[in-house]
Image: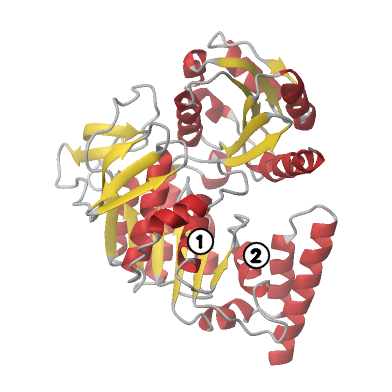
């Protein structure tokens, strides 16, 4: 059995290296091959993690939260397994462990931080039971893959019940996530933003319109965005629970900062939604018993990657690449663009491959009309469904240029733009656009 595991590890590493040489990510292939060679490999490697295993689930913010948690643990001197690339289904999870194993097939790790796709948790949890799950939020996402939000919620509850000792670290401001955590029977703790910060956007789609406990209409004292806020049921006793890790004194100008209890936390990130990502990471580390006195230093050194607020500087143009794959996420990306008061160019890439979801009707639920007030110099639409994106903008009287080839669009924006570029892409455009920008940065 040991020889089988070693062979699986070696083969997976060779496959991953070949894929990388070919410009492909290759992580899921490496995991798939390793699991086919040794079906017990994930269970056995997970058993070798010396301390705790975290999984991070939810619709938006998984990759940022998971990678930041990994960096936080590493800053405490811990050895950590992490699927940094965001490959979050079973094969990607297997690859995270296998590619971190030594050539003898053994693992040298104190912790594992594993991002897990909501629909894949049921396939992953039979291999190991995590100690903690961070549940960021549950929004409508890829209807042709996940179906309605209730299906995702049921899958999450079923997965949680497979690991009954796993503690859920849940976003209390999301009624859907909170309901799932409560109904699962697992122990849970909460994080959130207790007080109102901004005037809510009345145009945003809110998934939590009806109480999942009794079906009555949900009421809100206020929203932060989408359905996140201070909610209560108009009929039964379901309401936002008391928040253990409560972000207060939130500032979003120039940099994000907030307090949690007596701790002051600051980060050079843009986007109010990142308060939730940072807060989730902080809550997870503290629940794991870590003091993380150096947390602000970790945030200063943390470099967002894989297209999550990733920064590039090319020929005098400052570029931000970010993922925008569903209405809630896209609306928050628009808010982040609007927080930058400088003139800017914008490229929006929309694909409809299987991993994106072939139904792009969600574009009509995004508040693109807000871009009219965002000091945008030019908008270029790109990708397979660029004409759909152009039509969507036309309906809110916003003019855009069409360039299906995103590399050409980026090069034109650098050559003729204002020097401040935002590139918003949905899922399958992310890795290729990241590689294009990396290549262009190296040409610089």
Residue at 30% across, 39% down: 250
Q: Nearer the viewer, residue 179 or 436?
A: 436
Q: Which marked residue is nearer to the observer: mark 1 or mark 2?
A: 1
Q: Nearer the viewer, residue 12 or 35?
A: 12
* Residue 100 pos. (x, y %): 64, 73
Q: In the picture, residue 106 is in which quadrant?
A: bottom right
Q: In the picture, residue 251 is in which quadrant?
A: top left
**Quadrant housing the N terminus:** bottom right
Residue at 51% across, 80% down: 49
Sequence-wise, the earlier of marks 1 and 2 is: 1
Residue topped by disc 2 = 91
Q: Nearer the viewer, residue 240 or 280?
A: 280
Image disc number at residue 71: 1
**39 relative position to 148: left or right:** right
Residue at 52% across, 83% down: 47
Q: Residue furthest top?
A: 397
Circles 1, 2 touching at the beta carbon (< 8 Å) = no
* Residue 18 pos. (x, y %): 84, 63
Image disc number at residue 177: none
Q: Is residue 316 above or below residue 247?
A: above
**419 relative position to 296: left or right:** right
Task: Give the alpha-carbon distance from disc 1 to disc 2, as whole Å.
Answer: 23 Å
**Quadrant housing the C terminus:** top right
* Residue 357 pos. (x, y %): 62, 40
**385 relative position to 165: left or right:** right
| Numbered disc 1: secondary structure | helix
Q: How is the image coloured?
A: secondary structure
């Amino acid at each position: 059995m040991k020889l089988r595991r070693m062979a699986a590890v070696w083969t997976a590493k060779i496959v991953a290296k070949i894929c990388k040489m070919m410009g492909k990510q290759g992580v899921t292939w490496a995991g798939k091959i390793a699991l086919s060679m040794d079906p017990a490999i994930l269970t056995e490697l997970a058993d070798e993690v010396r301390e705790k295993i975290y999984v991070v689930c939810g619709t938006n913010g998984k990759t940022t939260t998971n990678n930041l948690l990994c960096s936080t643990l590493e800053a405490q001197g811990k050895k950590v397994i992490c699927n940094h690339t965001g490959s979050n289904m079973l094969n990607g999870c297997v690859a995270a462990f296998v590619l971190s194993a030594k050539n003898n097939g053994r693992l040298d790790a104190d912790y594992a931080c594993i991002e897990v796709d909501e629909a894949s948790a049921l396939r992953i949890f039979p291999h190991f039971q995590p100690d903690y799950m961070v549940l960021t939020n549950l929004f409508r996402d890829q209807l042709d893959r996940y179906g309605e939000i209730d299906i995702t919620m049921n899958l999450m509850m079923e997965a949680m019940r497979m690991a009954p000792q796993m503690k859920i670290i849940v976003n209390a401001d999301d009624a859907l996530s909170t309901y799932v955590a409560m109904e699962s029977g697992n122990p849970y703790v909460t994080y959130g933003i207790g007080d109102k910060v901004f005037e809510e956007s009345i145009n945003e789609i809110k998934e939590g319109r009806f109480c999942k406990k009794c079906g009555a209409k949900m009421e809100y004292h206020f929203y932060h965005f989408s359905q996140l806020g201070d909610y209560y049921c108009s009929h039964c006793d379901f309401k936002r629970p008391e928040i253990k890790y409560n972000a207060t004194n939130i500032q979003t100008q120039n940099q994000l900062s907030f307090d949690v209890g007596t701790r002051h936390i600051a980060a050079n990130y843009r986007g109010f939604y990142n308060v939730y990502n940072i807060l989730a990471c902080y809550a997870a580390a503290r629940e794991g018993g870590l003091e993380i006195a150096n947390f602000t230093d970790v945030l200063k050194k943390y470099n967002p990657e894989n297209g999550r607020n990733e920064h590039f500087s090319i020929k005098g143009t400052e570029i931000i690449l970010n993922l925008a794959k569903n209405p809630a996420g896209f609306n928050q990306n628009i808010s982040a663009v609007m927080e930058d008061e400088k003139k800017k160019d914008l490229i929006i890439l929309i694909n409809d491959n299987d991993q994106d979801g072939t139904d792009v009707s969600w574009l009509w639920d995004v508040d693109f009309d807000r871009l009219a007030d965002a000091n945008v110099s030019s908008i270029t639409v790109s990708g397979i469904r660029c004409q759909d994106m152009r039509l969507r903008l036309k309906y809110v009287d916003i003019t855009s240029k069409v360039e299906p080839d995103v590399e050409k669009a980026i090069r034109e924006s650098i050559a003729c733009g204002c020097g401040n570029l935002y590139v918003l892409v949905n899922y399958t455009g992310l890795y290729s656009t990241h590689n294009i920008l990396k290549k262009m940065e190296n040409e610089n």
